[in-house]
Image (cartoon, helix red, strand yellow):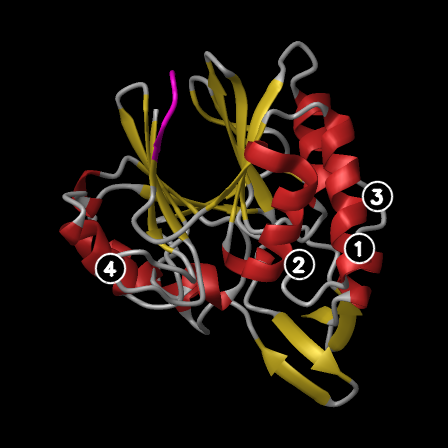
């Protein structure tokens, strides 16, 4: 299994970074693309890294925000065959802000219609391919987290706190244990680990990969989350994007070498 970060907020070389995430994964002879960043830059980086988007077998959107979906058009232009898997709750309806000052942060308006023949809406615990699952949130009352983060969805002409029913985890069964990818972990990184464990009770969780949405969180909250993550027994954390460098450093203080800061161009190899 090889995991290549095509876009992250950070870079350590000549590859361009941006606020967003796009990850290319090879696993048991198949190629997966998780998210497309907030522009087509991920595709340029892929070419520089020797990765062909035309050869991707499965595209996956982690959740319905622009910084993970706005590069979809670039992917569809380069890949003529792969289906793109969204969670059944995904719409063009995500906002952030307070009171009347709300900003649209969702999927580019019109994409879901334009590319409807390429899109598949995954419902429930969805087997994408042998050894690969798409999991919805099973933790109740996540709308409380949405409200605390000032994230909303427009439904029936009303703004409601986001319960993140459009967010999904991409889970791989490997020789090391389950590798769980959730690009922003809006439902809580510790909750996501527990959700994967509940969905696959006979498996150990090896790693969680993605952003943890901590860039604006107080230090005490970050340290408390680190404690809850430690209690899950997970062995590795690869985090970046919306975690933020400050929070990532705090997590490393608390959890030590089990935490790796991701960046554009980083590649990780694990046993399938």
Please state if 109 lies on the left or on the right of 138 as rendered. Answer: left
Please state if 138 lies on the left or on the right of 131 as rendered. Answer: right
Mark 2 vs 4, N-terminal side: 4
Mark 1 vs 3, N-terminal side: 3
Disc 3: CA contacts within 10 A as few (<14), some (14-19) or many (>=20) = few
Q: CA distance from mark 1 to mark 2?
A: 9 Å
Q: Are marks 3 and 4 in contact (CB under 8 Å)?
A: no
Disc 2: CA contacts within 10 A as few (<14), some (14-19) or many (>=20) = many
Q: State the mark number for residue 140.
A: 3
Mark 2 vs 3, N-terminal side: 3
Residue tagged 4: 15
| Residue 206: image location, x then y, percent | 57, 23
Q: CA distance from mark 1 to mark 3?
A: 20 Å
Q: CA distance from mark 2 to mark 4?
A: 24 Å
Residue tagged 1: 221
Answer whether residue 189 is visible to the viewer in this image: yes
Q: Check the image and name the residue furthest to the bottom.
A: 100
The question of residue 269 being in magenta is answered with yes
Q: Residue at x 61, y 69 (%)?
A: 93
For label 2, the SS is loop
Q: State the mark number for residue 214.
A: 2
Residues shaded magenta: 268-272
Q: CA distance from mark 4 to mark 1?
A: 32 Å
For label 4, the SS is loop
Mark 3 vs 4, N-terminal side: 4
């Amino acid at each position: 299994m090889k995991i290549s970060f095509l876009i992250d907020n950070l870079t350590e070389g000549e590859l361009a970074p941006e606020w967003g995430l796009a990850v290319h994964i090879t696993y048991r002879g198949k190629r997966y693309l998780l998210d497309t960043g907030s522009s087509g830059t991920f595709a340029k980086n892929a070419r520089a890294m020797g990765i062909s988007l035309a050869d991707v077998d499965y595209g996956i959107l982690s959740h319905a925000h622009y910084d993970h979906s706005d590069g979809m058009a670039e992917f569809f232009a380069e890949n003529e065959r792969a289906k793109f898997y969204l969670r059944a709750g995904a719409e063009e309806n995500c906002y952030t802000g307070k009171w009347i000052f709300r900003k649209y942060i969702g999927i580019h308006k019109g994409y879901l219609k334009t590319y409807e023949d390429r899109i598949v809406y995954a419902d429930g615990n969805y087997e994408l391919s042998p050894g690969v699952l798409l999991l919805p949130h099973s933790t109740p009352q996540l709308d409380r987290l949405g409200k605390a983060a000032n994230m909303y969805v427009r439904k029936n002409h009303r703004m409601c706190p986001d319960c993140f029913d459009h967010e999904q985890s991409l889970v791989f069964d490997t020789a090391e244990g389950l590798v769980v990818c959730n690009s922003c972990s809006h439902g809580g990184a510790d909750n996501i680990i527990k959700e994967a464990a509940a969905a696959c009770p006979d498996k150990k969780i090896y790693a969680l990969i993605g952003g943890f949405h901590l860039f604006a969180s107080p230090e005490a909250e970050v340290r408390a989350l680190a404690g809850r993550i430690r209690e899950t027994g997970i062995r590795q954390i690869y985090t970046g994007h919306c975690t933020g460098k400050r929070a990532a450093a705090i997590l490393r203080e608390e959890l030590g070498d089990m935490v790796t800061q991701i960046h554009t161009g980083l590649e990780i190899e694990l046993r399938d």
